[in-house]
Amino acid sequence: MATDIQAARAPILLQPEACGPKQCVKGDPKHPKGDPVPLPEPLEKTTHAVLQVQRPVSPGPKRFSVNVLNGSDGMKISVTVRSIDTIRKLQQKVLKLRPDLGCGNLAYNGKPVQPHKKLSELQVKPGAMFVTYQKCHGG
């Protein structure tokens, strides 16, 4: 007795009505000369699916609070920042709140941070502590 095996058909997915010519990809990718690009042998009998993003993946820059500790007198200042803010912008916000502080150099996780670095690049979390310090020049 012989067994007949047939490939299962994938369900037909409906495209949204608002899908325009620049938003949806139809058919196989084309070769510059117009011929379809041949698929490698293992992929010849596979079903292809396309995902279309309907809304932004990330909610945007988060607002959170960080603390700045004055290394010379132990005063702590809480500042609300966004994840896309730079260290320079954090320093400006601290100077707005406490002009007498003279916020110069900041350290995070025991390392000095550059003014052009973004808080997201440094992976700063809510409640993080920055410490002010003064550089000692000379030898």
Image (cartoon, rainbow, N blue to C red):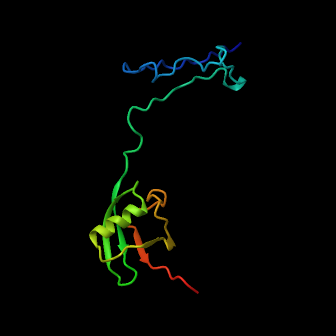
Viewer-closest of 113 and 124: 113
Which image quarter holds the N terminus? top right
Viewer-closest of 101 and 124: 101
Q: Position of residue 12 (x, y in %)?
A: 48, 18
Q: Position of residue 102 (x, y in %)?
A: 35, 75
- Quarter of the rendering containing residue 80: bottom left
Relative side of 102 to 39, left or right: left
At 39% from the left and 57% from the top, the residue drawn is 85
**Number of marks:** 0
Q: Position of residue 51 (x, y in %)?
A: 48, 29
Residue 126 visible in the picture: no
Q: Identify whether 30 is placed above or below 113.
A: above
At 33% from the left and 69% from the top, the residue drawn is 94
Relative side of 74 to 23, left or right: left
Q: Identify whether 103 is placed above or below 15.
A: below
Viewer-closest of 95 and 109: 95
Farthest residue to the bottom: give it.
139
Which image quarter holds the C terminus? bottom right
Q: Identify whether 84 is placed above or below 65.
A: above
Farthest residue to the front: give it.
138
At 36% from the left and 53% from the top, the residue drawn is 62
At 37% from the left and 73% from the top, the residue drawn is 103
Q: Position of residue 63 (x, y in %)?
A: 33, 56
Viewer-closest of 53 and 129: 129
- Quarter of the rendering containing residue 53: top left
Residue 12 visible in the picture: yes
